[in-house]
Amino acid sequence: GNSKCFFAVDLGATSGRTIVGTLSDGKIKLEEITRFPNNLIETGGHFYWDIYALYFEIIKGLKIVAKRNVEITSIGIDTWGVDFVCVGDDGALLRNPFSYRDPHTFGAMEEYFEKKVSKEKVYGATGIQFMNFNSLFQLYAMKRDGNSALKNAEKILFMPDALSWMLTGEAVCEYTIASTSQMLNPVTKELDEMLLESLELPRGKFGKMVVPGYKIGVLTDEVQKMTGLGPVPVIAVAGHDTASAVAAVPAADEKFAYLSSGTWSLMGIETKDAIINGRSYELNFTNEGGVEGTTRFLKNICGMWLLERCRKEWGDEAPSDYGVLLADAMKATAFQSIINPDDEMFANPADMQAAIKQYCAETGQHVPEGYAEICRCILDSLALRYRQVFGYLKEMSVFPINTLHIIGGGSLNEYLNQFTANATGVTVLAGPQECTALGNIMLQAKAAGAVEDIFDMRRIIADSVSMKRFEPKDKAEWDAAYEKYLKVVESKENK
Ligand code: LRH
C-alpha cells in the first residue's frame, strides 16, 4: 500500500530520542534512530538545559535518516513542559534556558500572588495547577532578579517551539505547550491579557498561537546543507510531551483514565470541557490543552524521578540491569518504609537517598538501607500515591472510570503496574512505551492528510501495539498499607 515516514523528536527531562514512524496499511511502526541523555547543567548557582546539545542531537538523527535515504514527510518536536528560551533581536539565543528544577522559583509563586495577581484569579483565568516552576512564575522570578536574557528578549519561545525555530527560522507558540505555562486562557485559547500585563510582557514577545497539525515552515538552507535533507516541513505537533502521549492512548472508548509514566507520572482523564471548580482548585488539578479541542484534566505526581536520581547515585553499587534491580527490590519487605513522593524535599535534593532516609526517620519508620530497600520504598509509595490521586480523579470525573491506561517508559515496570492495579482497584492496561512518539507521529500524519482525527489515530495505534493487562489483587493488604500511607503523610505535614 501507500506508506509514509515521519520523524519524531521526543525530549524528556531525563532523556531524548529521535524516532522514525512508518504508517502503512493502517498500521504504525516505530524505529528508534538515536537515544541520548538530557543533562541538567549546574553552574553559577543555577540549573540549565543544554539546548545546543539537544539541537545537535536532532541534527545527528536527521543526518542518519538522510544517509539511509529514508524519505521523511515531515518532522515534529515534543518536549517536557513549562521551560522556554529567550531570543534576542539579532536572532541569537540568550543564555541557555533555565531548568524547571532551578530553585529561583522557590517562593516565587507566593510572592507573585501577593504582589501581582491573587491565586484564585490565576486559577480562574487558567485552570492550571500550581507548581512553583510554571512559566508564569519563572518569568516573574527572572524579571524580579533582573535576568539579562529576559531583559533583552525580543521573543520568548517554549522549548519545542524554540527547537522548531532553530530548524525553520519561524517562531510560533503551540497551544498545548503554551497551556503548561499557566498563562493561557482555555476559554479564549490565547495568552491571558491580565497575566501578560502582570509581567509587563506584550503579547508580541511570544510567537503566534497555533494548534497541533500546523505547518511551521521548512528546514532552513543551513540545516538542509548540514543534514543532506531537502526542504522538509516541520509540523507543530502537540508540543507538550504529555499531550502527545494522551493523544496516543489506545483506548477503546472515551471513558478511560491514563497515567503517563516517565520522569513525572501524569494521572488524569480527557474531557471536552475544562473542570474548574472549588474542589479542583483545592486538590490542585490542572486543565492542560489537548488535541482537537480536548482538555487534559490531570495532576502531576512525582514519578520515576526518584528512582532515576537514586540510580545515578548508586552507580556500580546497584545492578545496572533494570530487571535485576526491580527483582531485588521485590525481595525486600513490603510497606516497611513509606514516603510521599510529592513531598517538596524530593524536588531536587543534592542527595536523593539521604532525603528518602530522612523522611522515613522523621516519620518514625524503618530507615531503608541499601538499593533494594530504597527501590522498594519508592515503588510501594508511588503506588499508594497513585491510589490517592486516583480517588480524587474518580470524585471529580464526569464519567465512571473502569480502566487505567499506563503509558510511557514507566509502563515497562510490571511490578509497578501490578501494584498500581492493586492500589487503585481497577484494571490496568500497560503500554505502549513510546506513546509520546506515537502521538507526535500521528499528529504529523494528520497534517499530511494520512489520518482523519483522534479516533482514527487511536484505532490505528490500538491495531499496531500490544498492551498488557493487570487485574487488582491483595485488596486487604493494600487497604491496610493505604491507611499507613495516610498516617505517615499526615504526620510529616504536621511537622
Ligand atoms: C512531563 C512534563 C509534565 C510537566 C513537566 C514539566 O515530561 O511535560 O507534563 O508538568 O514535564
Image: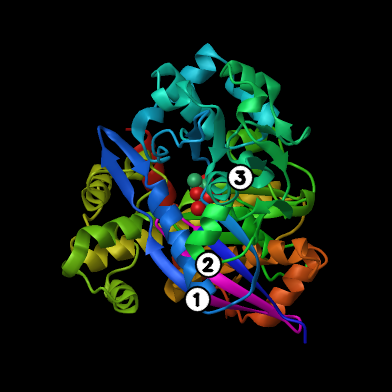
Neighbours of disc 2 within 10 Å: few (<14), some (14-19), many (20+):
some
Residue at point 55% right, 60% down? 224
For label 1, the residue is 67
Q: Say left or right for 302 vs 354.
A: right
Residue at point 43% right, 17% down? 144
Q: Say left or right for 385 vs 494.
A: right
In the image shown, does 478 or 221 lie closer to the viewer? 221
State which quarter of the image contains the C terminus: top left
Give the mark nearer the N terminus: 3 vs 1.
1
For label 2, the residue is 228
Amino acid identity at mark 2: Gly
Give the mark nearer the N terminus: 2 vs 3.
3
**Residue reaching furthest to the top:** 115
Q: Specify whether residue 13 is in view.
A: no
In the image shown, does 270 or 334 lie closer to the viewer? 270
Mark 2 Cβ inside 8 Å of ligand 1:
no
Q: Position of residue 39 (x, y in %)?
A: 34, 52
